[in-house]
Amino acid sequence: MRQQGRPINIDVNSIKFDGRKVAGFALIAIIAVAVVSSVYTVEPEEVGVVLTLGRYTRTTEPGLHFRLPIGIDKVYKVPVRRQLKEEFGFRTIQAGARTQYSNKDFQEEELMLTGDLNSALVEWIVQYKIADPVSFLFRVRSPQETFRDMSEAIMRSLVGDRSVNEVLTTGREEIADQLKVHMQELCDQYELGVDVQVVVLQDVNPPEPVQPSFNEVNNAIQEKEKLINEAQSDYNKEIPRAKGEAQATILAAEGYALDRVNRAKGDIARFTALLTEYKKAPEVTRRRIYLETMTEVLRNVDRKIILDKDIKNMVPLLPLGEGIVK
């Protein structure tokens, strides 16, 4: 060190260090670090898994907690009350009103071979919760990657058992349901500590080179379904109406038959009663029948000319000028 061009000599022996002060400062620093490291906070949607010297000792609930300092206790915070989500075939950059997706190509993940040797691009979502945080952390190495590998393997197996038309149309819901069941079985088998809650096939499309052909097939299938629904609607209208008319005709015929039978029975009873009376007084009964019959017949005749068969002195004159005698 120089000042005004003249050298300055410093006597090192004149500098004295106070060892007690240094030790005091070091002790204070150690105590501060120990105090700070012995306090930790667990958020409301988390639990804290505590390891003491590398061995699991306890699980702490949300709130402020204390632990042994300086790395003796190590805490892993696990979001057990939050629904987690894994996306396959795409990635969401920003969720909300204006959802944004990554432009990165995930075709290796979503491109799958169907049972009829066709290709399909399958995108799906698996939503789950961590049911057992200890198992999730320590039973399986890299649990999140294992979970994704399980989901992708099961999905490829399910898609490979179906035709491309089933994967694109009618089989989507069944695939999602079976994926959920098989994933839960594997998670329980591997003791992954995960509860699979929802599986959704986000989008299923054919590869881009063949997409126009698949669109035409889908349009044809929709047109077919439309015609089938229209035919079913017409069937539902016509068949009940025809059944109603048939039932009405049957009831009318049954009513007519019952009326004819009752009339016949009535005529028989009347004839039987008349025969009984005829046997008692034939002449009287015969005349009464004759008179009743003539009464019914003559009632329908417009003009009546009654002649006495015993007349001799009088020539009957017919009113010919008034038209034809009926």
Image: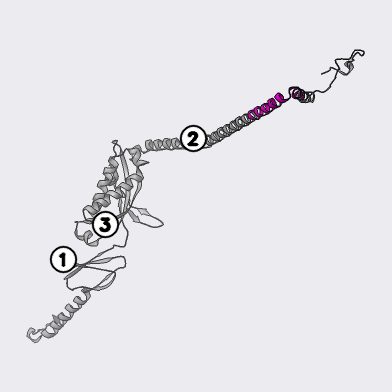
Q: Residue at x 22, y 75 (%)?
A: 36
Which segment did they paint magenta? 264-290
* Residue linked to disc 1: 55
- Real-space Cα distance between discs 1 and 3? 22 Å
Q: Is residue 296 above or below residue 56?
A: above
**Residue 179 in the image: x percent, y percent?**
30, 48
| Quarter location, residue 211 | top left
Give, as a three-letter code, the residue at label 2: Ala
Nearest to the eye among marks 1 and 2: give it: 2
Q: Are marks 1 and 3 in contact (CB under 8 Å)?
A: no
**Label 3 amino acid?**
Val
Apparent side of residue 301 relative to residue 66 in the rendered image (left or right): right
Q: Residue furthest left?
A: 13
Q: Earlier in the sequence, mark 1 or mark 3?
A: 1
Residue 5 in view: no
Q: Is residue 2 visible?
A: yes
The numbered mark at residue 194 is 3
Q: Is residue 175 left or right of residue 292?
A: left
Circle 2 is placed at which residue position? Answer: 231
Say which quarter of the image contains residue 10: bottom left
**Most common secondary structure along the magenta stretch:** helix
